[in-house]
Image: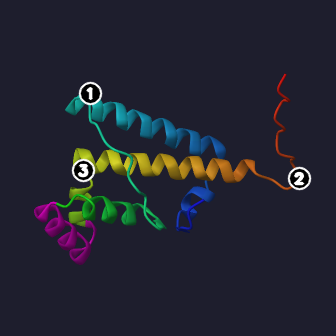
Amino acid sequence: MTLAVNLRFDLARLTDAELAARCDAIWADMDALEHDRGALHTSPRWRGPIRHPRAYLFFAMAGSGSASELDILLSAFVSGTALADVVSRLPRIRLHLALCEMQDILDEMKSRTRSPLRPAPSRPESI
């Protein structure tokens, strides 16, 4: 388990149905990306030590290694949200943000299923 600061309090306030609706919306966005730009291939990326969409955007841009994207990144975070919104529309960045959002939702669902009152399921004995 990785130590990370979870700043996704917005997910904790959602109901299970709302979390499921967000999952459906993310999958629809990922399908639209695939159909609009062809098959986008991405390697698994590190979400970073901070669980928040702004941090994901920062790490996606910082990890790209492109000088022009790093200039855009610094301008976005210095000037405010308008430029950050433009940057987050890049197909590669949108895919990264969608994957991070989906992982956050899955983490929230896992945390809701763990309960001290509910025993962990036992593994069936091998034959």
At 27% across and 61% down in the image, what residue appears? 63
Q: Earlier in the sequence, mark 1 or mark 3?
A: 1
Instruction: Estimate the x, y position of residue 115 in percent, counting from the top left.
Output: 81, 53
Label 1, label 3: how many angstroms apart (C-alpha)? 15 Å
Kindly identify which residue carries mark 1.
35
State left or right for residue 38 relative to residue 47. Answer: left
Amino acid type, callout 2: Leu
Please count the marks in the image: 3
Figure check: 85 above or below 33: below
Work out which quarter of the rendered image holds the N terminus and state it. Answer: bottom right
Snapshot quadrant of residue 62: bottom left
Which residues lie in the magenta part? 66-81
Q: Image point 18% across, 67% down: which residue?
A: 70
Q: In this view of the protein, which residue sits in the foreground, 102 or 123? A: 123
Q: Residue furthest top?
A: 127
Q: Secondary structure at mark 2?
A: loop
- Does the magenta segment cover residue 37? no
Q: Is residue 21 left or right of residue 71?
A: right
Amino acid carrying label 1: it is His
The residue sitting at 68% across, 54% down in the picture is 111
Q: Which residue is mark 3?
A: 89
Left or right: where does residue 2 sit relative to residue 121?
Answer: left
Q: Which mark is residue 117?
A: 2
Q: Is residue 5 left or right of residue 126?
A: left
33 over 14 or under it: above or below: above
